[in-house]
Amino acid sequence: MFSLLCVHIVLFCLFGLNLGDNLSPEYNVSLDLHPEERWDPVVKNFDRDLLQNVVAHILETAVPKWVHFAIKPLAAELDLFFPQPYAGEIRGLSKAFGVSLGDGVLLNLVYEVTAACTSIIAQDSKGNIYHGRNLDYDFGDILRNLTIDVNFIRKGKIAYTGTTFLGYVGLWTGQSPNKFTVSGDERDVGEWWENAISGFLFRNSPVSWLLRNVSLKYFGNEIVM
C-alpha cells in the first residue's frame, strides 16, 4: 500500500470556522527551542512506561518484521536521510520516551504502512464551515489516549496548531491562525514500501511534515487570493 495523500485546505479568508468541543489535551511546543528539546515539556505529562508499551504494541501490530530489520540500522545515520528539524525531533522524542532511535523512526513511518483516512468539508445552513478528518487505525483505542492538540509557538505567538498523537512529529490536521485549515488523507496506489524507499534514498519528506512546513511558511504572512 502506497500512501498517495490528498490535501484538503479551507481558507479562512473565504469561510468562517466553527470550533467544536476540544476533547484532547492541549500543549505548547516552542519552535524556538532546539529540535531535540521541543517535545520534552509535553512528554513529561505522560507515564513513560505507558508510552513504551504503546510504541511496542503499535510497531509489533502494524510493521512487518522485515521492515524492523531494514530500517533500524539506518536510524544511526538519521541526519543523512531525514531533514531537520524532524530528524532532531524524532531523536529527542525517542530519548524522552526511553525507546531506541530505530523504534522512534519506525513510529514516524507507521502511517505509510497502515492508514486509510478520509477528510470531509461541510457547510451548515448558517454558513459555518466544518473541516473534519477520521483516523483509520486498527489501534485507535490506544492512540486515543495519546492524541493531543499542539500549539506550535514561534517568538511568543502561535505559528500554527494541529492535532497529532504524541511521538509522531508530523501533522495530518492543522490550522494556520485566521488563514486556513489543512488535512491530509491516504489513497491506495502501488506499494507502501515505494514511499519508504523514496523517503530514505532521496530525502523526501512525508506529507505530514510538509503540512507543518506550509503552516509555518505563512506565519506572519498574508495569503494573496
Image (tube, helix red, strand yellow):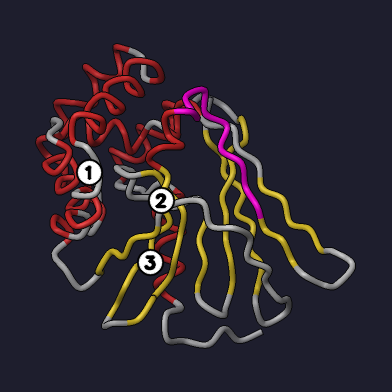
Q: From the viewer's perspective, tell me whether residue 29 is left or right of residue 141.
A: left
Nearer the observer, 14 or 112: 14
Amino acid type, callout 2 = Ile
Assign a secondary structure to mark 3.
strand
Of 155 and 143, nearer the camera is 143
Q: Which mark is residue 159?
A: none
Query: What residue does disc 1 label?
Result: 81
User: In the image, what residue occupies the spot 40% across and 54% down?
Assistant: 25
Q: What secondary structure predominates along the stretch shown in magenta?
A: loop
Q: Whole-Å distance between the Cαs marked 1 and 2?
A: 27 Å
Distance from the alpha carbon under mark 1 to that under mark 3: 27 Å
Magenta segment boundaries in residue numbering: 132-141
Q: Position of residue 171 (x, y in %)?
A: 44, 52
Which residue is label 2 attached to?
148
Answer left or right for 181 relative to 120. left
Distance of mark 3 from mark 2, alpha carbons?
A: 10 Å
Q: Nearer the viewer, mark 1 or mark 2?
A: 2
Q: Quadrant of residue 190?
A: top right
Q: Secondary structure at mark 2?
A: strand
Task: Report x, y in % for residue 211.
Answer: 46, 59
Task: Look at the numbered disc 1 and give the secondary structure of its residue.
Answer: helix
Residue wearing tag 3: 151
| Residue shown at the point (41%, 61%) measured from the top left | 212
In the orientation shown, which residue stands out farthest toward the right?
Answer: 125
